[in-house]
Amino acid sequence: MDTTVSTPAPERKKIIFSGIQPTGVMTLGNYLGAVRNWGPLQEDYHCAYSIVNMHAITVRQDPKALRENTLRAYALLLACGIDPKKSIVFIQSHVRTHAELAWVLNCYTQFGELSRMTQFKDKSAKHADNINAGLFTYPSLMAADILLYQTDLVPVGVDQKQHIELARNIAERFNGLYGKTFKVPEPYIPKVSAKIMSLTDPTKKMSKSDENPNSFVAILDDESTIIKKFKRAVTDSEAVVAYREGKDGINNLMAIYSSVTGKSFQEIESEFDGRGYGDFKTAVGTVVADHLKPVREEFARLMNDKAYLEDCYRNGARQALELSQRTLDKVYKKVGFVL
Ligand code: ATP
Ligand code: LTN
């Protein structure tokens, strides 16, 4: 008689990967659209998060500033609650498999596909004097970042959806040719704050590389700067706090307020019923500043402990290399490279 008790196989913990470019100080858009979700995910998933400095050089960077911003971005991730004991947290250029897989994937990505990427179109319009090949093939490197870890879910803002769709297509194409090699990833996009808009032009995405610092709130801005920026935010002349088409500025402030306080749009509308935009803007500024205060304090503490940071990113790179090498080995074998 068979006496073994058959217990169901424990469900495999899903894998999360995401990245952020060290192109400046993280904004409220990056935070609410992506990074804020990364910490809580650590409890239920295997997570890997990267400072993608190789992506950053697709537009010209000052080397000294890039080096400093990379370290600051790393410290900021930890300050936002990403725990290097729970997640793999690393700097992209430390892990050579990313560039290696990116080359292979470039050969399985079509020129036409890359030409359709809206980020490429936007960035090449913005940097017309430097439309380099890296800017064009950027999505293949991003696909490599994701596919190397057999990622299930990619938590990002909505602007990255198109790149993730391309990564899925590349994975499916490669799997179709050579048999199952890559997990096909899904985007993971928040409902309310997937696209935070610029405070000076609410039809444009808030972006950390915007040359007008009033257009974005940086996570490290102090309280009075944050409140000042919200007070100056472009709205409309209607003086009614309501979420409606055509009220881009107010809709954006409501999305921010809702995302930070957890209140619904309806609750916000009644809270500010009969009150002017001045009150509303101060309230948004205050909740954002209060919410970010512990992040600022933890960041300052971490930046005073460079030895700890170095320990964390070296260790992160070691773990990332070990995992990603397994996928790269499979790929090299499948395409016919002599091993
Ligand atoms: P850059 O200005 O250099 O293009 P960026 O501000 O767009 O940078 P990234 O490093 O490219 O920032 O993005 C990091 C993460 O933040 C991505 O998941 C992206 O989708 C998200 N993100 C960026 N801007 C916003 C925004 N305005 N609203 C919501 N999410 C955003
Ligand atoms: N392309 C992204 C940054 C990025 C990324 C990734 C995001 C690079 N590699 C992998 C998620 C997964 C951006 O511009 N925001």
Image (cartoon, rainbow, N blue to C red):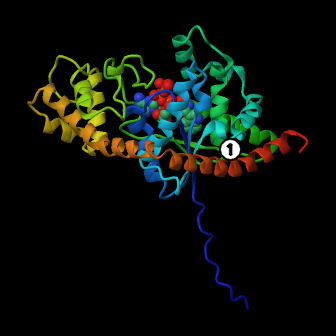
Mark 1 CB within 8 Å of ligand 2: no
Q: In which quarter of the image is the C terminus?
A: top right
Relative to 102, 20 lies left or right: left
Q: Quadrant of the N terminus?
A: bottom right
Q: Which residue is farthest left?
A: 274
307 or 242: which is nearer to us? 307
Quadrant position of residue 6: bottom right
Where residue 53 appears, as percent x and y from the top left, is 58, 32
Q: Note whether residue 288 is visible.
A: yes
Is 233 located above or below residue 304 in the figure? Answer: above
Relative to 247, 142 lies left or right: right
Q: Which residue is farthest bottom?
A: 1
Residue linked to disc 1 = 148
150 or 31: which is nearer to us? 31
Residue at point 60%, 61% (across, down): 12
157 or 38: which is nearer to us? 38
Relative to 64, 136 lies left or right: right
Where residue 323 appears, as percent x and y from the top left, is 69, 51
